[in-house]
Image (cartoon, coloured by chain):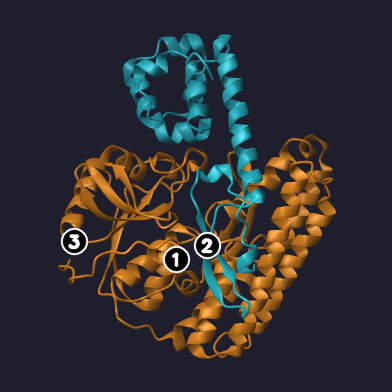
Chain colours: A cyan, B orange
Amino acid sequence: MDKDEVPQDAIHTYGGHRKLFYATDKDGEYLGVQSSGWEAEAIATGSALEELDRLRADAWARASRGETSPLEYYMVLRRMDVALLSQTSGLWQWRVRRHFKPAVYARLSDRVLARYSDALGIDIATLKILKETP
Amino acid sequence: MTTPEPLNAFQHRQSAHCESGVVSSMMTHHGLAMSEPMAFGLSSSLTFALIPLVKLSGLPLIAYRMPPKFIINGVRKQVGFHLHSQTFRNADKGMDALDRALDEGRVVGLQTSVFWLPYFPEDMRFHFNAHNLLVYGREGSDYLISDPVFEGVVRADRASLQKARFAKGALAAKGLMYFPEHVPSTIDYARAIPAAIRKNERIMTRAPFPFIGVRGIRGMGKNLRKVAADASKRDKYLPLYLGHIVRMQEEIGTGGAGFRFIYAAFLRESAKLLGSDILKEGAAKMTEAGDEWRMFALRATRMCKGREAMDIPLLDEILNRCADREIAAWEVLRQLPGVK
């Protein structure tokens, strides 16, 4: 990649930052060039973020209808899945899934909630109720 | 443990990738000037791997470089210094140990989770546990951080840094902190460079598994054809899969083209150090491979966005061209004495 061809597309996923890329001058000598981003990268990151948004909106909608517990929503909000939440909370996957049942979740002790609170970085009082907006 | 030698004030330098950046800054700070590409190349860290059986959020594991800690350990072996490294079961003890090392005037490397680092922009925060950074001091309750992928120095409060160091899950850091001791002031490049290239040539062209190295690149093309032929995966999974490939190639701090440009930069720097035309030609060939990878990313993302028709045979063809060009680079590099 020629140093003048390093994309400077000012992509939104960089949040105003610039990353370093390696590119060549006319003699083939390499140098580090800062880039404000490449559209191709923005599309790839964007589609991953859109998928996360979709999962979040979906979990929120189901939680607000009482089909799942707020836990699933907060898990998705923290960009985790059941496997990761299980690892970070130290609870078995089947237990995490069981806690997606609103009735079971409502009866959870603060001791168990504290493990979710620690894993998700969200305080217990917040975890108990669904946020008003997704 | 010995008391550290008096060092010059720490200087932050932006890098493309976290681990090679940390190693390069660390060596330079300890009096052995080393560029990021040199750290990457000396550790023979270039690879390609596609492992469909290992899934991350439902997508296969794809890697363009060797696993975490490979760079630091590779450079340690080639340069010959002692790495003091420590993990902790207790998070408070881990933070206390960091404080002590900082009070001794050391610059300390940490493995962390990107998600919990407060200075990362929202869109870049994913659960990746093997992000390396350097802590060079404390001010009040803040830690002063040189994160290699950022333009300037950053800060994190104690609670956030603790969470980032002790996040659980795949590749959990367990509070890993490290710093070098007894760094020599010179490297025997004439020995180290061919040895490092030789090792990397084995990884890329003679891996015992078909999903690693150049064969793995062709395998990814075949895998794409397979996914595209599956009606249940074609519409939703295929675009996510393509996006995932491009993210691994470009987004995660690879210096462009899945580390191919960093490696080419290493070859070019080596060519100068050793006065070798073979290395110079190898660098040019690796650059061509990198350019082809960029073409793949461009076309694949356009297809995902519907800006051009989905054409998996074309993407397969581009991947085969990437593989051909990488083979051509290794064929040149094999002529370097000590490589074959």
Q: Which mark is residue A102?
A: none
Q: Residue at x 26, y 60 (%)?
A: B107
Frontmost residue, B161 versus B339 = B161
**Residue type, label 2:** Met
Near-viewer residue (B297 or B3):
B297
Residue to which mark 2 is pinned: B66
Distance from disc 2 to disc 1, alpha carbons, whole Å, reads 8 Å
Counting other residues with Cα less than 10 Å from the Cα at mark 1, is it few (<14), some (14-19), or many (20 or more)? Answer: many
Give the camera-side residue of B145 and B60. B145
Q: CA distance from mark 1 to mark 3?
A: 24 Å
Q: Position of residue B68 (x, y in %)?
A: 46, 58
Query: Please, what secondary structure does the residue beneath circle 3 have?
Result: loop
In percent of width and height, residue B318 lies at 77, 61
**Quadrant of the rendered image containing residue A89:** top left
Is label 1 or label 3 in front?
3
Q: Which residue is mark 3?
A: B105
Q: Position of residue B218 (x, y in %)?
A: 74, 62
Q: Is residue B37 above or below residue B269?
A: above
Q: Would residue B130 appear left or right of B333 to someone viewing this image?
A: left
- Kind of element beneath mark 1: helix
Residue for badge 1: B71
Quadrant in which the C terminus of chain B is drawn: bottom right
Q: Is residue B206 visible?
A: no
Identify the chain of the residue marked 1, using the numbered disc in the image: B
Label 2 neighbourhood size at 10 Å, few (<14), some (14-19), many (20+)?
some
Please report contact status of discs 2 and 1: CB closer than 8 Å, yes or no: yes
N-terminal label among 2 and 1? 2
